[in-house]
Image (cartoon, rainbow, N blue to C red):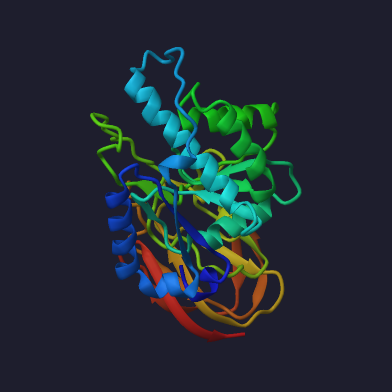
């Protein structure tokens, strides 16, 4: 996060280990490592005590789990319930993260943009990774209800399944896309806090590259002579959606034209291609050019402008130019 993004965020870290010595040890470690952010209020450290948990009256086994495993997962459900209840008044939205994830750069701005694209739609939760609850965003106004739901059914299911069931109750019909692709968070841990459990799953859509700068592009029309794969239209490169352009079989002399709808002061142009999962699928030999005057459309897929000036060459799939053009 940059400084502006930090102003909008409070990170609440819950220490819930049953062993008081371990809990205090980790609290002190965090204070030493991140003292600056604790003092600034960005990091808020809280802990639970064994006395606040209700007695575990396990009368039946579910999911063929042992009594010990049911007790472990039920405590985790209550941990989440307490965290949600505590956090309900800090901000307009609440995001679930775990302590072993990697985030994309400027994930806060990316989340804010995605929320804006859904502001005219009804939603209860938005998703920013492919995992059950990591990267789940809720409206804070729903946290009290979700917390009470978790407390009520803490013995019945693991926390991720209970949260998904809560969403099914709240959203009986799924009318809009609520998951952002690519994902903003990657799960890095391998060993679960539950003994003997290995978590190898990864979000294949995750990218830790800066995909877009966090300011809006000027309004523009986009045309290209490159073939379009399925519904990955070229317009997606310039709007604020989470989608992307996927070109098919580019060839020599193909062009990708961005035509501003009105004059604008342009200081920087950045173009990125490819993904870490497709390292060879990039723009290899191309130039980034600018022109000050749009003349006409040569065809419905190619524009004619005044004399173009080359401002950058593509290197390893990217072009980055600082310009002074009106």
Q: Which residue is drawn at 37% across and 41% down?
A: 204
The quadrant of the picture occupied by the C terminus is bottom right
Let me know if residue 210 appears in the view.
Answer: yes
Pick out the residue farthest to the front. Answer: 51
> Horizontal and vertical percent for residue 105?
42, 62
Q: Which residue sits furthest bottom?
A: 324
Q: Give 90 or 165, whichever is nearer the viewer.
A: 90
Asked if 110 appears above or below 51 in the picture, the reply is: below
Q: Residue at x 53, y 38 (%)?
A: 230
In which image quadrant can residue 298 be found? Answer: bottom right
Residue 300 visible to an observer of this rendering: no
Residue in front for this viewpoint, 237 or 223:
237
Percent position of residue 26, x then y? 30, 56
Whether residue 303 is situated above or below residue 228 in the rendered picture: below
Q: Is residue 315 left or right of residue 171?
A: left
Q: Which quadrant holds residue 261?
A: bottom right
Q: Residue at x 72, y 51 (%)?
A: 119
**Relative to 47, is 108 on the left or the right?**
right
Is the residue 311 above or below the residue 27 in the image? below
Q: Which residue is drawn at 76% across and 49% down?
A: 120
Q: Name the residue nearer the viewer: 101 or 216.
A: 101
């Amino acid at each position: 996060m940059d400084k502006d993004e930090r102003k909008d965020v409070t990170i609440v870290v819950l220490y819930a280990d049953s062993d008081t010595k371990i809990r205090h040890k980790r609290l002190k470690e965090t204070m030493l490592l991140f003292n600056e952010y604790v003092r600034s209020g960005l990091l808020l450290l809280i802990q639970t005590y064994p006395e606040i948990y209700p007695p575990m009256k396990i009368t039946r086994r579910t999911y063929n789990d042992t009594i010990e495993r049911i007790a472990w997962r039920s405590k985790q459900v209550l941990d989440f319930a307490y965290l949600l209840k505590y956090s309900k008044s800090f901000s307009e939205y609440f995001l679930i993260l775990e302590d072993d994830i990697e985030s994309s750069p400027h994930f806060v701005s990316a989340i804010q943009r995605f929320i804006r694209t859904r502001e005219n739609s009804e939603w209860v939760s938005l998703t920013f990774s492919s995992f059950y609850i990591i990267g789940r965003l809720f409206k804070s106004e729903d946290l009290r209800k979700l917390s009470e739901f978790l407390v009520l059914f803490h013995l019945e299911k693991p926390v991720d399944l209970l949260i998904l069931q809560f969403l099914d109750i709240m959203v009986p019909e799924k009318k809009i896309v609520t998951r952002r692709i690519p994902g903003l968070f990657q799960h890095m841990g391998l060993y679960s806090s539950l003994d003997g459990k290995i978590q190898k799953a990864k979000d294949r859509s995750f990218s830790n590259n800066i995909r877009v700068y966090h300011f809006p592009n000027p309004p523009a029309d986009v045309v290209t002579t490159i073939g379009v794969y399925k519904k990955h239209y070229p317009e997606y490169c310039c709007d604020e959606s989470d989608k992307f352009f996927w070109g098919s079989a580019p060839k020599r002399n193909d062009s990708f034209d961005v035509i501003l709808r009105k004059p604008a002061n342009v200081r920087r142009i950045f173009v990125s291609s490819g993904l870490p999962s497709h390292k060879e699928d990039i723009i290899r030999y191309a130039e980034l050019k600018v022109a000050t005057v749009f003349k006409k459309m040569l065809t419905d897929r190619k524009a004619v402008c005044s004399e173009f000036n080359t401002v950058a060459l593509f290197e390893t799939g990217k072009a980055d130019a600082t310009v002074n053009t009106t």
